[in-house]
Image (cartoon, rainbow, N blue to C red):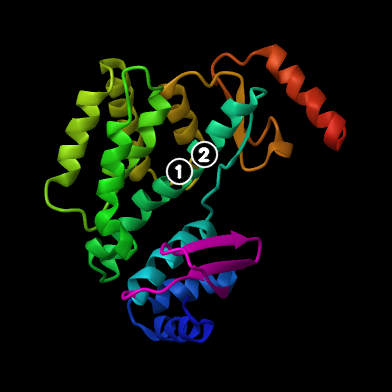
Amino acid sequence: MLKLGIAEKWHREAKTDPRLKPIIEEVEKAYKVRIAVTSDPEWASAPDKKTAEIEVSDTLRPLPSFAHEYLHLRLSARGYRHILASINFNLSKNAAIGRLLSALDNELQHHRMFDDFVKAGFDGVDFYAESDGGAHIAVKKQIEALTFQSDPADALPSFLSVIAPGGRWPDDEREALRQLIEKTCPAATWSKLLKIEGIIDRWKQQDGLNPLNTIAEILEALGGYDDTFIGENVTTYPCDGAILPRMNMNPTFDKAVRDALAAQHGKQ
């Protein structure tokens, strides 16, 4: 496992790198950044009010890796909202929604970060960890496991990987996997995935950093997630999130949520 001293040395080098210096300085005006080491090959970062942590693992590309994580943190510092909380009274469905929210939170940030990564002077093929070079093999297995009975949400994580920006996948591999998804899924599922791709394309062009409506639109495109609340925190219900379906809220669901939150946290 990587030694903390080496990770801290890489961090010091990152702070003096001319490509990274302005990004890091902006982030550190908002957060006190600490470094931790992890055995996971993929680095991670997480902001928390006035602090942030970057989990560092062994790599041959520490500077691009720091660029990736600091760009995540810069989005947060600039106001990106992390829509990771949900309420759905079907516990298995709520767990599935949580997994989707986590995946979308990460990928929507990537679509906003990638151009800045390249503009800073880094090669787009280095946008992810070294393990990304073989990730297409796992994605292909996930796609091959899909059937015509699979829920559209089961196909979305693989599709998000296929349309993700940058990386070291072999030439034409993304297009081949895209065609495999289309061949494997029902036409209705493929149509939903194409609609979601359009939603993400519009997200990339927006100026604002609140993905709430984008995520709500994606969940509505998938279907099956009525009577769900999503937001940064469930205790902010209903004013600081989205209730699905957005155009026709179920008053029975609304009352049930208010009653449940009142029992746990006091009157809503």
Relative image position of residue 126 (x, y in whole percent): 27, 65
Q: Which residue is mark 1?
A: 103
Q: What secondary structure is found at the residue carrying circle 2?
A: helix
Residue at x 32%, y 74% (from the top left corner) = 61
Q: CA distance from mark 1 to mark 2?
A: 6 Å
Identify the amino acid type marked 1: Ala
Which residue carries the number 2 mark?
99
Along the line of sight, which residue is nearer the eye, 260 or 206?
A: 260
The residue lying at 54 percent from left, 16 percent from top is: 247
Q: Residues within 10 Å of mark 1 (few under 14, many from 20)?
A: some
Element under label 1? helix
- Which of the 4 image quadrants contains residue 181? top left
The answer to whether residue 104 is magenta is no
Q: Which residues are magenta?
A: 34-61
73 and 173: which is toward the camera: 173
Q: Nearer the viewer, residue 36 or 222?
A: 36
Judged left or right of residue 56, residue 123 is: left
Residue found 42% across the figure and 28% down from its top: 153
Residue 177 % position (x, y): 20, 38
- Left of 107 or right of it: where is 100? right
> How many numbered discs, if any?
2
